[in-house]
Every structure is written in C-alpha cells, then in structure tokens.
Image: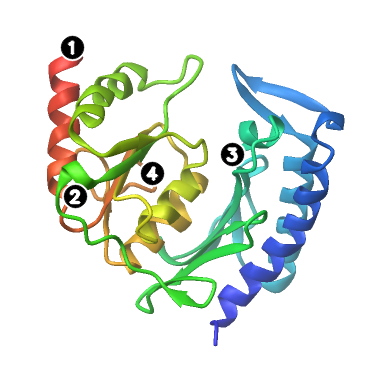
Amino acid sequence: MRPAIINVMDGAARKAARSLIHDFGEVEQLQVSRKGPADFVSEADRRAEEILRRELGKARPGFSMLLEEAGAVGDSASANRWIVDPLDGTTNFLHGIPHFAISIAHEEDGELVAGMIYDPLRDESFWSVRGSGAFLNNHRLRVSARKDMGDAVLATGLPFGDRPGKQEALATLEPVMAGTAGLRRFGAASLDLAYVAAGRFDAFWEFGLSPWDVAAGILLIREAGGFVTELDGGNDPLNGDTILAANDALYDPVGRMLREAIKAKTP
C-alpha cells in the first residue's frame, strides 16, 4: 500500500492533471503572458498551481509551500514544506508537445522525504519515500545497469534567452555526442530525472534549475540506487546552480567528462 503522504500527493496531482489535460486540448485558446525570453506562463499553469495549493493545504494545513508561480507561502518556521511545480514543461505544453509533468516533493527539517512526478498524458506516477525505494505506479524502479559510456543515453537541458550557464552547456555537448549512444533534450527536467530513476536514461545534467524542478527527482534517483549531486560534486543539488544524476557505474566518468569539457572550452 502507498504511504499516506503519497496518497495526498497523488490525489492533488490528479485533480490538477484534469485541468491541465482539458487546457492542453484547447492550447490555442489559452491566454499567455511572458515572464521572460522564451519563458512562458499560462493560465493553465496558474490554474493547476491553485488546485495543488488548495488540495495540499487542505490535507496538510501545517505545511508551508514553495511554488513556482506564487513563491514561498505559509509559515516559514514550519518543519514541513511542499515544493511544487504545477507544470514542468510549459513551453512543450503551449506548443502542443505531449511531454510535461506535475512535480511535488515533501521536505521535512530540510531533508527530502517524499516525492512524486506525475505525467498526466501517460498516466505515469513516479514516486518515492525516503528509505522505501522508488516506484513507477506500483512497480519498483531501479537505475540502469549500463557501465559502458558508448552504450549510454544521456539527457540534458539547454539554457535559453539570457539565462546563465549557456557557454558551459554548449561546451558539454561535443564530448557527449562523440562518446555516447545518444543525447536527448526533452524540455521537462522533472521527467528527465524520473527517467534516470527508471533506467530509461543513464545520466542527466543541467544548469540553472530551481528547487521545484528537481526536488522530487532527486529523491527518486537516490531511492532507485543512483547518484545525484551538483556537477562539481557538491551535495546540495536542490539549491545549487547545477545538477548531475546518473547510475552508480557512470556517475564518475560522466561527471569527469563534463567537467573537463567545461574547463577546456570556457574561461
């Protein structure tokens, strides 16, 4: 049976998902504003966040929240916090690309203790509780067992507009393209992390993400037997400027390859 905290996340995510699926079917009718270059926020995003805020708040009224749109809300002194991205993959969503997700994590006393990434269109629920493993719906997850870089498929995200990290990101592409079986850029970091936990990707790295992009995915990968840190090896990927996630065999060689590429190509 799923733990109670996961049932709370699942119920809230599915209510928000119904709203997203409805809006995805009418994507051309959405009222869209710009937050910045190529960074869109839609009415669908705001509606989903309000549903999540209401449902999670009703189930756990003592929790504070960190939300992508509304920011920090609730009692900042609370030991418990929800970290929520109501629509990861907004640009995909607005272009009619069926690859986006809802991400919810529970943090207690500064530690990630539970998380869920829900893909509404595929009805895939990736979830984990600290110390209890990681799951896709009701099936246990494990990171891939690939050890050879030449067999590995890696995923990343590329900074857009004037976001920091562009030169570093570009520097990493050439060695990955030359030395692996493939590189993917799907545009939803939460699902990239979930796919590492599920063994679909062997590694993932990105620059300039926010806590709501990665919180649930960090726990998923660790509970699935993988490693996730900052790109330089720092142990705070939740709040750091970079993230690197991989299976246990490829974590070191992938990290070394990326760091060497950045050092060689950037001042």
Query: Which callout, 2 or 3, points at the residue further toward the start of the chain?
Result: 3
Report which residue position mark 1 lands on.
267
Report which residue position mark 4 lands on.
239
Report which residue position mark 3 lands on.
89
Residue 107, percent from left and from top? 47, 63
- Amino acid type shown at disc 2: Tyr
Query: Which callout, 2 or 4, points at the residue further toward the start of the chain?
Result: 4
Discs 2, 4 touching: Cβ within 8 Å: no
Q: Look at 80% across and 35% down and name the residue there.
A: 27
Residue furthest right as drawn: 29
Report which residue position mark 2 lands on.
251
- Amino acid type shown at disc 4: Asn
- Amino acid type shown at disc 3: Gly
Discs 1, 4 touching: Cβ within 8 Å: no
Residue 247, percent from left and from top? 24, 56
Q: CA distance from mark 1 to mark 4?
A: 24 Å
Q: CA distance from mark 2 to mark 3?
A: 25 Å
| Dot 4 crowding, Cα within 10 Å, few <14, some 14–19, many 20+ | some
Query: Which callout, 2 or 1, points at the residue further toward the start of the chain?
Result: 2
Where is 128 relative to 171, above or below? below
